Every structure is written in structure tokens, then in C-alpha cells.
């Protein structure tokens, strides 16, 4: 699975959009981009995933560049409860395939009041 | 759905004792994963099962660790004998598509 690079930490004002970048320049054509987050003392929580197209769900939006070498997770209106470590993971296979996730160091997002 | 259920949530044990962590995956999920998280090493995959069969156990630290999945609704991770360096949070996760994690078992070996 391709390696990802994320900034170690970011701050965001409450109510503003949080844009979390991820670099995955060695991504292959059959690798998906997944985002998880881990709130302190809890298990990682699935947020969103995508292959090529931009994706949106009730939690966030995922923007993948045309060359697929980077992506951005957008939390449109960050709240204090969004303070967490956010992990960008690249994995071969669609969500239905039985393959594990390899976690990096992630980005510690702190939402400030 | 109740989500992935792990027990115990917290355990403190003495070095040398046997530790058994338990996991009930989400009903209908066919893959189960055991991860360990420490400050030093982050989240590491220990082992995963597909349809109750172990697929990849290359992350299991050593022979002191063993995992079983006797049926689709139950898995155990056993450490025998336990050592202080095994202190960590152990997460179980299950999947039919996206992977969902339990709340973790916080293990302290003194």
C-alpha cells in the first residue's frame, strides 16, 4: 500500500471549515484513499473514502486531485467535538475486500473556540 | 447496531499472568482485525481473520500472543505470559466493507 504524508498538527477555529491535506504521490490506480479519525480514548472512526472522484457524506467531503497524488479532507463547519487525530490511509482494493488498514502518524486537529 | 464490543475495557495485571481480551464483531461482518496502539509505535495491526480464518498474523509480536476466532461472532486475543511492554490499548475491528473499530481494551501490565 502507498505511503501517505500528513502534517503533524493543525488548528481550526470553531465554525470554520477544516481542510486537512494528505500527500500520496506513489498511489497506484487500484488504491483507494480512506480517512479515519480517532478522538482521544476512543477507537478509530471511519469518515469517508474515495478512488478518483470527489466524495461527500454527512460527516465530510473528500477532494482528490486529478493526478490522485494528494487529497484533502474537508470538515465544512468544525466543532469542538471534531478535535481528533485524522488519519489518511491508502489501501489496495475496494471497501469490500478483506484487507487491513495501515495507520501512519496522522494529523492532530485542534478546533479552537 | 451495537457496534464492535470489546471486553474488558480496562485490565491491570501482574507480569507473568495470562491475559485474555475478547471481541464480538458487528453481526454479518466477515472480517475481524486486532490492532494494538502505543504512544511509541502508534496503531499496529496484529492479526486479521476473514470468514473466521486467520489471513495475516505477521504483526503478532511473538509466541506469547495468540488469537482465535472460533465462530463468526467471537474472537479472543491471548497474551501468556504477559510482560510490562505489552501495556497498550488493544482494538478489535470488523468489516464487511469499511472497517469499524471497538472502543478498545486498555491493558496495563505491572
Image (tube, helix red, strand yellow):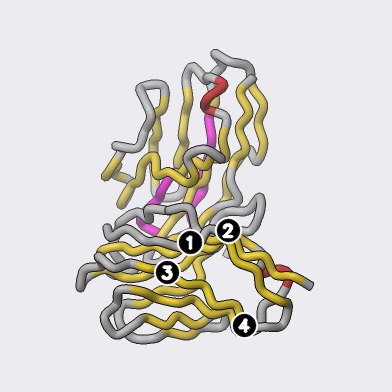
- For the point 45% across and 63% down, which residue is it? A6
Q: Are marks 3 and 1 on the same chain?
A: yes
* Residue behind mark 3: A22
Within 10 Å of disc 4 (Cα), the crowding (few <14, some 14-19, many 20+) is some
In percent of width and height, residue A38 lies at: 58, 58
Q: Nearer the viewer, mark 2 or mark 4?
A: 4
Q: Position of residue B53 (x, y in %)?
A: 29, 44
Asked if the residues shown at circle 3 and circle 1 are in contact, with their CB atoms under 8 angstroms apart, the answer is: no
Can the viewer see residue B2? no
Q: Residue at x 52, y 20 (%)?
A: B82
**Disc 1 and disc 4 on one polypeptide chain:** yes
CB contact under 8 Å: marks 2 and 1: yes
At mark 4, the secondary structure is loop
Tell me the quarter of the picture where residue A79 sits: bottom right
Q: Earlier in the sequence, mark 3 or mark 4?
A: 4
The residue that disc 2 covers is A38
* Residue numbers of the magenta segment: B20-34
A48 left or right of A28? right
- Left or right, A109 with reference to A105: right
Q: Residue at x 41, y 66 (%)?
A: B98
Q: Which corner quadrant of the image does residue A62 belong to?
A: bottom left
Amino acid at each position: 500500500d502507498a505511503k501517505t504524508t500528513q502534517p503533524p498538527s493543525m488548528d481550526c477555529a470553531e465554525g470554520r471549515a477544516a481542510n486537512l491535506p494528505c500527500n500520496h504521490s506513489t498511489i497506484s490506480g487500484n488504491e483507494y484513499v480512506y480517512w479515519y479519525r480517532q478522538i482521544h480514548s476512543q477507537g478509530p472512526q471511519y469518515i469517508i473514502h474515495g478512488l478518483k472522484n470527489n466524495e461527500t457524506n454527512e460527516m465530510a467531503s473528500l477532494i482528490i486531485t486529478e493526478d490522485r497524488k494528494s487529497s484533502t479532507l474537508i470538515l465544512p463547519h468544525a466543532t469542538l467535538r471534531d478535535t481528533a487525530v485524522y488519519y489518511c490511509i491508502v489501501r489496495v482494493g475496494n471497501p469490500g475486500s478483506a484487507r487491513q488498514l495501515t495507520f501512519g502518524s496522522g494529523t492532530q486537529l485542534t478546533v479552537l473556540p | 447496531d451495537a457496534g464492535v464490543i470489546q471486553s474488558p475495557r480496562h485490565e491491570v495485571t501482574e507480569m507473568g499472568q495470562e491475559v485474555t481480551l475478547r471481541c464480538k464483531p458487528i453481526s454479518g461482518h466477515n472480517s475481524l482485525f486486532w490492532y494494538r496502539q502505543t504512544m511509541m509505535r502508534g496503531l499496529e495491526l496484529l492479526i486479521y481473520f476473514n470468514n473466521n480464518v486467520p489471513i495475516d498474523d505477521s504483526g503478532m509480536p511473538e509466541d506469547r500472543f495468540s488469537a482465535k476466532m472460533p465462530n463468526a461472532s467471537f474472537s479472543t486475543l491471548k497474551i501468556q505470559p504477559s510482560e510490562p511492554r505489552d501495556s497498550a490499548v488493544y482494538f478489535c475491528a470488523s468489516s464487511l466493507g469499511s472497517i469499524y473499530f471497538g472502543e478498545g481494551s486498555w491493558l496495563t501490565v505491572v
